[in-house]
Image: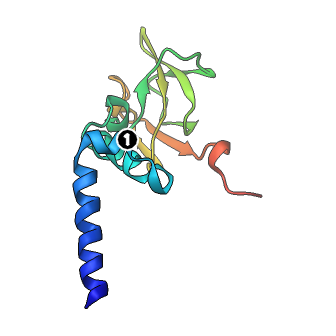
Amino acid sequence: MKKSIIAVLAVSAISTLGSSAAFAHEDYSEGGAVHWLEHVQARASSPTERELATYGYASNATPSRTVIVNADTRYINVTRLETVALKVGDKTINWTFDTLGTNSFPLSKVVQGGDKVTVYLEESPLYRSGS
């Protein structure tokens, strides 16, 4: 009985501290857990535009290569997190294929004129498990 009352009081105290921004930034007990939770709660409510982009994003990064997409192109192979210059017709866009859990998708999801072209993604060497 005593242990359950103590547990309820502890949960209540943690809930109160966790809901207050003033306490969350001042309390660094237990490895900063309350401070960290405050940031996670704030962050969880506002994902960035890049995080919402299922197929990656247009990028200013230097592309590793240029892929020319024409009427004969049926597929392209890219590595996850690779930035590629996609040349479709007279337009070129640098695209970073930042995709989580996506192994293939239609290029038309990224760029107009990518109809009938499938993008196949290989896992980045940065995230492959040990050999």
Q: Nearer the viewer, residue 17 or 52?
A: 17
Residue located 74% across and 57% down the image: 130
Residue 33, relative to residue 74: is it above or below? below
Most distant residue in the right direction: 131
Q: Nearer the viewer, residue 39 or 93?
A: 39
**Left or right: where does residue 77 sit relative to residue 23?**
right
Image quarter where the N terminus lies is: bottom left
x, y percent for residue 118: 44, 40
Most distant residue in the front direction: 2
Give the residue type that dot 1 points to.
Glu
Which corner quadrant of the image does residue 20 belong to? top left
Question: Is label 1 in a helix, a strand or a loop?
Answer: helix
x, y percent for residue 56: 42, 33
Residue located 58% across and 19% down the image: 63
Task: Count the labels in the image.
Answer: 1
Most distant residue in the bottom direction: 1
Residue located 49% across and 14% down the image: 60
Residue located 24% across and 59% down the image: 15
**Left or right: where does residue 91 sit relative to residue 66?**
left
Residue annotated with mark 1: 26
Question: Which color scheme did the rendering employ for the protein?
Answer: rainbow
Q: Nearer the viewer, residue 32 or 71?
A: 32
Which corner quadrant of the image does residue 106 belong to? top left
Which corner quadrant of the image does residue 81 belong to? top right
- Within 10 Å of the Cα at label 1, are there few (<14), some (14-19), or many (20+) other Cα atoms? few
Image quarter where the C terminus lies is: bottom right
